[in-house]
């Protein structure tokens, strides 16, 4: 663990705050909410998601264009077309977007359309991909591997940090166990440990941990209570019709109810939630600014805080 000299805290109050856009940050007092479908299916689908969740408020929209699937016969994502849809949604609604990359070749293409690049569980120890992302001018969400130890997880983040990219967010998404009732087991102890050991922002993905939509809200609340800086949740306009991971997707109305339920928990642990009205005004202003831009701007670097 001592080899992770860049990821580990230098003092007990050392934490990094990462700017995801001009108005959205993670790692500070405010809880970050990332939500959207497992897969980008159409522009109409993504437009409905962004329109209805913007004032929930959801600060970042997620959507997969490249999908790593267990079976080679399952839907693999829309690829370049999916990225174009995300880019359109990003500009129209003024919201940052996150999407997964699975190979070095996909990084440049995805970075032209997305603010945040995600490394999925299966690629947590794809070291060449991690090193390449260390040179990318994008924030990276690194998901914990299916059976990775906490030390392996932190050292995987170190690969990105060691190449010069300080904008890394750790995501606990559940680990495998002997029990098949849930898809995985959300390791709340990992969230606590990561917050104690590293200065990096830590979020939770209760959707992939549970695999069942009726468990997602309670796991989300538990993650915030344990100190997570945010959550990433799968939701869909018509969950049962989702082309991938339908069983774990929330409806948009359930997603909004989940966010509302987080307010008292965030308050109890000394955190804040974005105000609906303020978020709406910020998104409108952001959308106007983005429409005027001809290309994606480089994002500000992470701020390291030693309050």
Image (cartoon, grey):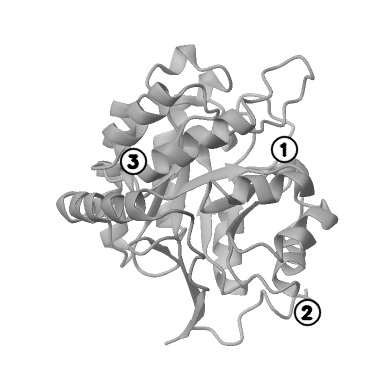
Of tags 1 and 2, the one toward the viewer is: 2
Displayed quadrant of residue 64: top right
Indicate which disc residue 2 carries.
2
64 left or right, relative to 147: left
| Sequence order check, earlier mark of 3 and 2 | 2
Q: CA distance from mark 1 to mark 2?
A: 26 Å
Q: Residues within 10 Å of mark 2 (few under 14, many from 20)?
A: few
Residue depicted at 52% across the width and 73% down the height:
301
Which part of the image, by quadrant, shows the N terminus? bottom right
The answer to whether residue 219 is seen in the rendering is no
Question: Which residue has dot 3 on it?
Answer: 92
Residue shown at 47%/12% (left/top)?
A: 241
Residue linked to disc 1: 176
Marked residue nearer the N-terminal end (1 or 3): 3
Question: Who's the residue at 32% across and 64% down the image?
Answer: 271
In front of the other: 284 or 240: 284
Of residues 157 and 205, the one nearer the viewer is 157
Name the outermost residue toward the left.
Answer: 277
Task: Give x and y (percent) for residue 257.
Answer: 27, 35
């Amino acid at each position: 663990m001592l080899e992770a000299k860049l990821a580990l805290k230098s003092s007990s109050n050392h934490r990094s705050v990462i700017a995801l856009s001009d108005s959205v940050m993670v790692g500070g007092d405010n809880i970050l909410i990332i939500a959207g479908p497992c897969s980008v299916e159409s522009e109409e689908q993504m437009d409905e998601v962004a329109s209805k969740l913007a004032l929930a408020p959801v600060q970042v929209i997620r959507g997969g264009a490249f999908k790593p699937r267990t079976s080679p016969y399952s839907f693999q994502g829309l690829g370049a077309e999916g990225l174009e849809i995300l880019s359109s949604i990003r500009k129209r609604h003024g919201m940052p977007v996150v999407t997964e990359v699975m190979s070095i070749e996909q990084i440049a293409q995805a970075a032209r359309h997305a603010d945040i690049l995600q490394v999925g569980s299966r690629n947590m120890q794809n070291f060449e991909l991690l090193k390449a992302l260390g040179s990318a001018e994008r924030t990276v969400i690194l998901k914990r591997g299916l059976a990775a130890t906490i030390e392996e997880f932190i050292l995987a983040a170190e690969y990105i940090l060691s190449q010069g990219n300080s904008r890394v967010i750790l995501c606990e998404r559940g680990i495998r166990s002997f029990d098949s009732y849930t898809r995985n087991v959300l390791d709340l102890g990992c969230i606590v440990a990561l917050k104690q050991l590293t200065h990096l922002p830590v979020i939770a993905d209760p959707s992939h941990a549970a695999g069942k939509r009726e468990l997602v809200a309670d796991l989300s609340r538990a993650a915030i209570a344990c100190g997570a800086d945010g959550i990433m949740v799968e939701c869909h306009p018509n969950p049962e019709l989702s082309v991938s991971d339908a069983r774990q997707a929330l409806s948009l109305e359930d997603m909004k109810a989940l966010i509302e339920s987080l307010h008292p928990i965030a308050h109890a642990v000394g955190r804040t939630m974005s105000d609906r009205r303020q978020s709406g005004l910020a998104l409108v202003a952001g959308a106007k600014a983005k429409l005027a831009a001809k290309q994606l701007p480089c994002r500000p670097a992470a701020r390291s805080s030693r309050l």
